[in-house]
Image (spheres, rainbow, N blue to C red):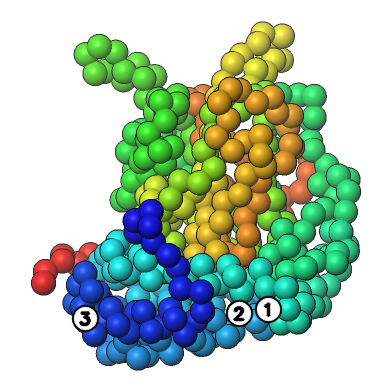
Amino acid sequence: MTPTHHHPETLADFLAKIRKWYEEDHQSFATLFRAMIAHVVPLPDDTPEEVRYDWRGKTIDQLCDFFSEWYEAGWTTKPNDGLNYIEKFSWLTYENDYGMVFVTCGPGLEMTADFTHLQGMQMDDEGPQGQELIKIWKDELGARMDDFTKGPWKTFNEFFVRELLDASKRPIDAQDDNSVVVAPTDCVINMIVDDLAEETPIPVKSVTMNVKQLLADSEYYKKFVPEKNSHGEIIQPGGTAVSCILMPDTYHWYHAPVAGEVVEAHDDIGGVYYGMRDFPQLLNKGNVGYGFDYEMFDNFRRGYLIFRTVFTDPHGAEHETYVAMVTVGMNSIASVRYESPFRNPQQPVPVSKGDRIGNFQYGGSLNILLFQYGRFPALQLHMGQRIGTLEQQDRTEKLFTHHRHHGPRHHHLTF
């Protein structure tokens, strides 16, 4: 996309635009679409019915019909069903290099940006449909709404980023102990890797996460990758990465995981909206994010913050360390919104543990935390601290339980 790109303001205009692109093969839109469809991979046998959509043999007309159904479903989607259309659409890129190319560059990327813009307008609508959607979600959330303010909310997005009723609903652990790191938001946490490099192999899958690119070429990336001497020999290993994945029906503000100061931040690094080779595997039967291909998040819309903190060890010695928090917006609205002090500050910003940093509006989202070598060796809890919740079965089945896969199949692009 170029800086002069203008999004269609109605669904009809959006559909007319992509139909015209197809007819004219605008920037190879039709050629790439047909190549993608020709290489769609069959759905795994254990794919749940509610997320099944077989794209094999589909046409531009059926793509337009799918977008129409997705948009209309947006007015009535329950929290537990929020990922269904995303997953249906993601079968286009499931182990499909042609699909990945289509949705991450050129007119295919512009198409997903346009549709995301329409969904954003939909979620910001102040009419009765937005109020009805709020009611659907409130009814579904039930007693979990007790943690939050009671509204009213003018739009669904205002409801989605609803605020806590009071700070006691999410108390900050060890407020005066800078050595304690807290969860930045309501999330499912996974250790990604404990030896970061500029391009780091992720356990279980033979993929990489490019730390330098993830931090948009910030010089601070060097804090988290191995230190080398003048001969190129590693004299200190790389650090640790932790993923904090948000579920659609939870609290969507994120907060400072440590105290100190934010020495650098960028709140809106442009990138792609869709493009996962294996979206269902992200959910991975409840172990959300384990063994997932985090490399793709180098290219999603995101922001990042670099925290400098000083903590005291049990012997009274002080230590300085840096922590990075990468906020990734993916799928649907894909927004990354920071509070004003953290929008590209020109000087360090003092921060307390638990200070509110920003929010994600409706859509998929996660935080990736990066720690320096030796500073965060494992997830550690004190007795009595929350490690999870017992769930009702229908929520578990909708948000967590998906099929397992046994390694991706790779294809080579040929036209």
Q: Is residue 194 above or below residue 277?
A: above
Give the residue drawn at x 44%, y 62%.
273
Q: Which residue is mark 2?
A: 74
Q: Amino acid at mark 3?
A: Glu
Q: Amino acid at mark 2?
A: Gly
Q: Are marks 3 and 2 in contact (CB under 8 Å)?
A: no
Q: Amino acid at mark 1?
A: Lys
Location of residue 366 in the rendering, given as x and y in whole percent from the top left corner: 56, 52
Give the residue drawn at x 52%, y 55%.
329
Which corner quadrant of the image does residue 65 belong to?
A: bottom left
Lateral position of residue 48 relative to residue 255, left or right: left
Q: Which mark is residue 78?
A: 1
How many residues crowd mark 2 within 10 Å: few (<14), some (14–19), many (20+)? Answer: some
For marks 1 and 2, give the CA distance: 9 Å
Q: Which mark is residue 24?
A: 3
Which corner quadrant of the image does residue 159 belong to?
A: bottom right
Q: Earlier in the sequence, mark 1 or mark 3?
A: 3
Residue 328: tell me if it is visible: yes
Mark 2 falls on what kind of element? loop
Q: Are marks 1 and 2 in contact (CB under 8 Å)?
A: no
The answer to which of 49 and 131 lies nearer the viewer is 131
The answer to which of 223 and 409 lies nearer the viewer is 223
Q: Is residue 119 above or below residue 293?
A: below
